[in-house]
Image (tube, rainbow, N blue to C red):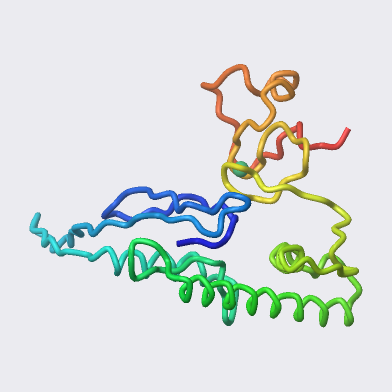
Amino acid sequence: MSISQEIWPPRHRTYFGSLQIQSSAPGEPYAVTRIRGCTGVIDLGDKRTMEFAISAREIADDLARELNGDSGEGSFHGVFVAAGDSPTDAELADARRRLREFQEKLVAAADLEWERSHNPMFITDLERRAARQLSLEKPWLYDPKPTIECPVCAERIKPGVAVCRACGAILDREKAARFGLARSPRKERPRNAEPQAEAEK
Ligand SMILES: [Zn+2]
């Protein structure tokens, strides 16, 4: 279950391949991603393998831990595992409380940082998002260099760029073509090169 509108890149596991976690649409209280049990395979060497069952619950717990847990203490991004087919009111209330508490913690950290440095560079995207989701007005909310999220890889990029500098996705086909970027799909640009279209005109 996710009570967040954040869109995550697909999750990968050897035993199920790739899985897109559903994010709730605006106005939707939650989104459900159904998880099935899988069979994992351990390579024992000498061309011998051993299969073992992984329950849906184990997989779901693992995915929820991964999605929630990369942002420090109390990290929670609104993903949880429900006991039944759909979340109970209590489960939803608990998830909302955990998300709000984590967002309030992020905002408090940003307040402290702002008091100390008055430098918007030290405020993280995560902290800004938390303040916006809590509908708070903060002096540090203003980002001097606005960025958007690449819809493909979620990297922060400048608005209006033709090509994502991180994953190479073409975001504005017309603009990319004008700069000669979208015409030959066979020619791959070097991964780390700064696309020309990124430069501000
Ligand atoms: Zn990208």
Q: Which residue lies furthest to the front in this view?
A: 89
Q: In which quarter of the image is ligand 1?
A: top right
Who's the residue at 60% across and 73% down the image?
99
Instruction: Provide residue 48's location: percent of width, then percent of height.
Output: 8, 58
181 to 94, vertically: above or below: above
157 to 139, vertically: above or below: above
Depth order, front residue of 4/160: 4
Who's the residue at 73% across and 68% down the image?
134
Instruction: Provide residue 180's location: percent of width, then percent of height.
Output: 70, 19
164 to 40, vertically: above or below: above
The quarter of the picture where the C terminus appears is top right
Depth order, front residue of 192/113: 113
Who's the residue at 32% across and 64% down the image?
59
Query: 195 left or right of 99?
Result: right
Query: 198 left or right of 69?
Result: right
Depth order, front residue of 191/54: 54
Instruction: Provide residue 71's location: percent of width, then percent of height.
Output: 59, 72
Who's the residue at 13% across and 63% down the image?
44
